[in-house]
Image: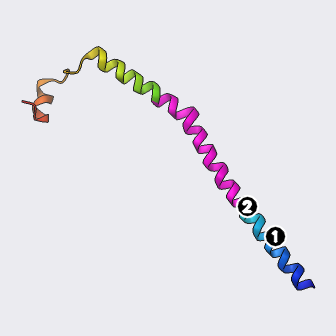
Amino acid sequence: MIKSLLSLFAIGLVAILAVSLVLSVVGTAIGIASFLFFKAAPVLFLGWIVVKVYEKVRGPDSLSSTDQSSLGGD
């Protein structure tokens, strides 16, 4: 009787530890995803827009002759 109660207690304890570990991993993943989505993505998106506007203003052929020769576009 005591042996079966102790084994059920041990199984329950292991199950609680496993569930808490899984939930902590899921919480960390959600935290990282929300940080990337709400903090990093807007900054990257604004930087991408600035680069695209800068390319349109400057023009496509804005490389110097030295840059063009080093890239092989003699």
Asked if the stretch drawn in magenta spans residue 31, the answer is: yes
The residues bearing labels 2 and 1 have C-alpha atoms spaced at a distance of 10 Å
Q: Which x, y percent locates residue 6?
A: 86, 79
Residue 10 located left or right of residue 1? left
At a point 11% along the width and 25% down the height, the residue shown is 65
Q: Which residue is mark 2?
A: 19
Q: Which x, y percent locates residue 29?
A: 61, 49
Q: Residue flagged by tag 1: what amino acid is it?
A: Gly
Q: Main secondary structure of the magenta part?
A: helix
Q: Which x, y percent locates residue 31?
A: 63, 44
Q: Residue flagged by tag 2: what amino acid is it?
A: Val
Task: Identify the secondary structure beneath mark 2.
Answer: helix
Q: Which x, y percent locates residue 37?
A: 56, 36
Residue 47 located left or right of residue 73? right
Task: Identify the secondary structure beneath mark 1.
Answer: helix
In this orientation, which residue lies closer to the viewer: 52 or 68?
Answer: 52
* Residue range highlighted in magenta: 21-44
Which image quarter holds the N terminus?
bottom right
At a point 85% along the width and 74% down the height, the residue shown is 9
**Mark 1: few, some, or many residues within 10 Å (few <14, many ≥20)?**
few
At a point 20% along the width and 20% down the height, the residue shown is 62
Q: Which residue is mark 1?
A: 12
